[in-house]
């Protein structure tokens, strides 16, 4: 890209360039603010994902231990029978969440309707841990997805901010300066020409 | 080589769509609490899901007679007039609830929040607040 924009050196063009510069500065300021807020959101979601992952790992380990113990102690048939005592399983309503124009997945979790049998306390405990683990997994998925989408948007916005800051605005400033210099030069030429004409007329008169 | 008109159009378009995540219609806290799945339609046509925990938090911070006056999402306005990094809350009820949530004892309407407060607020009320940019 050349250092200045190729335009005709006219006053109209100068006005147009000034208008474009004002607009570019406005967009640059807004995009920079947006970028800062997006980065803050990204770090908030990253912290959330980290916290959930740390919470989830022991829960997951516990859930696997309970599952192995339940299947080996009660057998598949009894565990299956226990599962059928659930009135309504855990459900989730999937939707979208819009963070500053960045769309991410969101899930509204509906709690399962369970009846504590009381007969097998370890199975009840297994169910409680499993439900908690699934909830954490869903939340982790949401946070991870948000991080990915926010990251993409940050990259895109950063490119725009940099293009405006390092390419477009300096180029417009250089072109405006060039046009101003051109006009000044033209004015000086005009003055010199007038002086010359004046002196020629004076010579002719004398 | 790009055309200069195209560049100007692109800048103008960027400026126009910066607030595409603004809500099409705002709903009161009471109305959202009544909904089975609280949803707000945005200007770009997307459905924004509001978290029930955040609605419950707002309800716990506010007297019940003000639930109808609190419109969700709460608009946090980025206005260049107030300096870089500052956001403004113009709604008096929203200002009251945010001040209570952030532990601000003395405040005036419009409430002006700075970056650390904005980060804290957005961590607590991610889906019930939205940041909009005002032309400066």
Image (tube, helix red, strand yellow):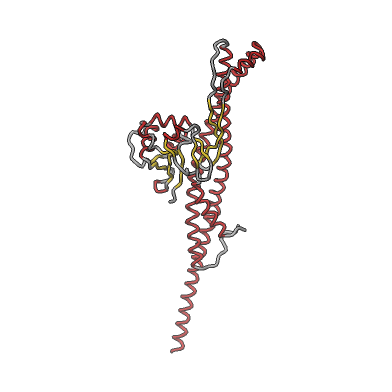
Vertical placement of A24 versus A108: above or below? below
Residue A53 shows in this picture: no
Vertical placement of B108 versus A83: above or below? below
Vertical placement of A130 versus B37: above or below? above
Where does the N terminus of chain B fall, quadrant-wise? bottom right
Q: Quadrant of residue A81?
A: top right
Residue B63: x, y in percent? 36, 31
Residue B106: x, y in percent? 32, 35
> Along the line of sight, which residue is nearer the eye, A160 or A140?
A140
Residue, x 48% and y 59% (percent of image)? A19
> Along the line of sight, which residue is nearer the eye, A198 or B96?
B96
Residue A161: x, y in percent? 53, 48
Residue B118 shows in this picture: yes
Residue B83: x, y in percent? 41, 46
Left or right, residue A84 beside residue B27? right
Count all numbered tags in the image, as a single digit. 0
Residue, x 58% and y 12% (percent of image)? A122
Left or right, residue A72 beside residue B32? right
Left or right, residue B61 beside residue B50? left
> Along the line of sight, which residue is nearer the eye, A1 or B91?
B91
Left or right, residue B70 beside residue A183? left
């Amino acid at each position: 890209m050349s250092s200045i924009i190729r335009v005709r050196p006219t006053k109209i063009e100068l006005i147009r360039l000034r208008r474009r510069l004002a607009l570019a500065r406005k967009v640059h300021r807004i995009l920079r603010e947006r970028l800062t807020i997006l980065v803050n959101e990204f770090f908030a979601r990253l912290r959330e994902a980290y916290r959930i992952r740390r919470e989830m790992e022991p829960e997951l380990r516990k859930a696997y231990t309970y599952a192995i113990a339940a299947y080996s102690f009660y057998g598949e048939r009894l565990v299956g029978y226990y599962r059928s005592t659930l009135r309504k399983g855990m459900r989730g309503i999937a939707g979208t969440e819009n963070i500053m124009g960045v769309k991410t997945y969101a899930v509204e979790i509906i709690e399962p309707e369970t009846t504590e049998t009381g007969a097998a306390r370890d199975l009840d405990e297994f169910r409680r841990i499993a439900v908690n683990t699934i909830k954490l997994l869903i939340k982790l998925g949401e946070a991870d997805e948000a991080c990915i989408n926010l990251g993409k948007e940050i990259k895109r916005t950063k490119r725009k901010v940099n293009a405006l800051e390092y390419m477009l605005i300096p180029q417009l400033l250089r072109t405006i300066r060039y046009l101003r210099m051109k006009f000044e030069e033209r004015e000086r030429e005009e003055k010199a020409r007038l002086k010359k004409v004046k002196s020629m007329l004076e010579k002719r008169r004398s | 080589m790009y055309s200069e008109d195209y560049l100007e159009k692109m800048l103008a378009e960027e400026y126009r769509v910066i607030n595409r995540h603004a809500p099409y219609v705002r709903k009161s806290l009471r109305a959202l609490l009544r909904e089975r799945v609280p949803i707000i339609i945005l200007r770009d046509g997307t459905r924004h899901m509001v978290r029930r925990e955040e609605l419950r938090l707002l309800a716990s911070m506010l007297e019940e007679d003000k639930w109808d006056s609190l419109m969700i999402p709460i608009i946090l306005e980025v206005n260049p007039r107030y300096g870089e990094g500052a956001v403004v809350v113009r709604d008096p009820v929203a200002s009251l609830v945010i001040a209570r949530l952030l532990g601000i004892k003395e405040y005036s309407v419009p409430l002006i929040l700075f970056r650390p407060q904005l980060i804290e607020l957005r961590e607590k009320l991610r889906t019930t607040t939205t940041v909009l940019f005002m032309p400066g």
